[in-house]
Image (cartoon, helix red, strand yellow):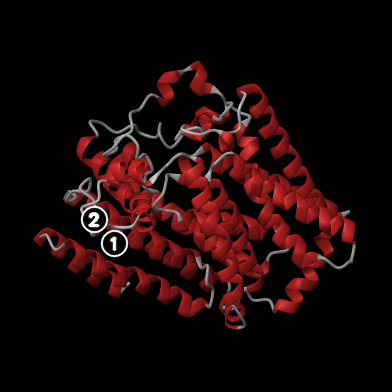
Amino acid sequence: MIIYLISFSVSFLFSWLGWFIPSGLVLIVGAFGLYWSDYRKSGNLIHLRALFGLFFTGGQALSCMKLSRLQTEWSHTTWACFFLAVVSFYLAYEWAERRHSSSSAGGWLKRQASGPHGMRRRERELALRRFEKPLFVSIAAVTAVSLAAFLFEAAVLGYIPFFLRGVPHAYSYFHISGVHYFTVSCVLVPSLYVLYAQAQREKNRVRNGLAALLTVVSLLIPVLCVSRFQLILAVGMAAFTFLAVKHKMKVWQTAVLVGAMIPCYVILTIARSHDVAYLNGIFEMKNSAMPIFVTQPYMYIANNYDNFNCLVENLPAHSFGMRMLFPVWALTGLKFLVPELVNFPIYVNKEELTTLTLIYDAYYDFGVPGVILFCGALGLVCCVLVQKLSRLDNPVGYVLYAQIAMYLVLSFFTTWFSNPATWFYLAVTGAVYLYVEYRQRR
């Protein structure tokens, strides 16, 4: 944390002087310092506090570089919010960790000393084998529901986004209210397959092959929807589930994963009719010669922080909880009966770039106190999850942990916890958890 405090202070000074690239480079040091501190203590590559520190602060560091003409100097309130978001998350996590450690008389710390998750790999794999059949049924059920919802949407709307050309926002219109939540629930299947693959104890070629086929189908759905985000979410959560179980990933496994994702991302970008001229026209980079494979990820990360600054500078009044309660209005259908519940403008610096940061709605609702309370609460929840990971009895808990880890990795992207899809994913995960628990007890 000391490295972060120093690097943040220097970054703010450099930005005030107009030295934007040095400002970002200094803050990157702070982001890696936060990650390394928790990784060194825990040995956990996907430690939740480490991930939040690395990716939320790292995204801010990239944005500090101001490589696009869309980006402007931030207000002092914006800087304060980014700083307090990290500090409140860390302090709340630290408080919860100390409280748990003292109440358990050091028991948890001793378990941590024996390994990142307190169980030897062999013991964990043997425990997983008890859940082979319920995990297979879960894969089949979630895939079947997701595929049926996708086919229903395609039939009603009359098209599949992947096969359209010249329509950059085809996926944005591929939604039937209520149904699309079931369509995108396919993102959970690869994570469940990771658990199933670890749980296999019978050489049942038919069932194993069917499980693999169902997983491929679940990955094809976001491809056909032309949703790069859903595909990244599905693969990322599967990778994190694997890490939660195995603790590490071999270099060749990482290379295969990245190598498979790059062509998929490029194909989906082309399928969305997002050519280089179109994207460069939106991103307005200061260096027009910068290659698109650098420009696109940079702007999808960096501009979100400038959108937050746009909110800070233009918001006339706070919404006092109405924005963060959007999942309630959406999932209950109240947004259709009372449109005023969701009739709040979004403040962004360009119409096409609408992705936000994790704390956007917290500030929208309550300002700086909202950011502090939200990140503090998130820190408490993450501490509980990290502690629970060492003694899971139900393997679906790994999927829950992987989801939260993925949301923290993509903390620069959107307001995850005021997004109804997030709570739908959590509800589906909870339903699978209860089913697996019930089958095991039987």
Helix, strand, or loop for circle 2?
Answer: loop
Residue at screen point 80% across, 72% down: 126
Residue 144, percent across and down? 76, 40
Mark 1 or mark 2: which comes first in sequence? 1
- Specify whether residue 249 is in view: no
Please state which amino acid type lies under the numbered disc 2. Answer: Leu
Task: Compute the Cα span from label 1 to label 2.
Answer: 12 Å
Left of 259 or right of it: where is 167? left
Quadrant in the rendering for residue 205: bottom right
The reply to whether residue 421 is visible in this rendering is: yes
Total residue callouts? 2
Q: Nearer the viewer, residue 125 or 266?
A: 266
> Is 125 placed left or right of 367 in the picture?
right
Question: In the image, residue 64 lies at what x, y percent?
Answer: 24, 58
Left or right of residue 96, residue 231 in this image: right
Q: Could you say which disc has been placed on residue 61 in the image?
A: 1
User: From what the image shows, is residue 394 above or below residue 176?
Assistant: below
Residue found at x 61% / y 64%: 388
The local crowd at label 1, few if under 14, some if 14 to 19, many if 20 or more residues have their Cα within 10 Å, is many
Name the mark on residue 67. Answer: 2
Amino acid bearing label 1: Ala
Residue closer to the observer: 157 or 365: 157
| Callout 1 touching callout 2 (CB < 8 Å) | no
- Residue at the extreme top of the image, as rendered: 337
Kindly state the secondary structure of the residue where label 1 is placed. Answer: helix
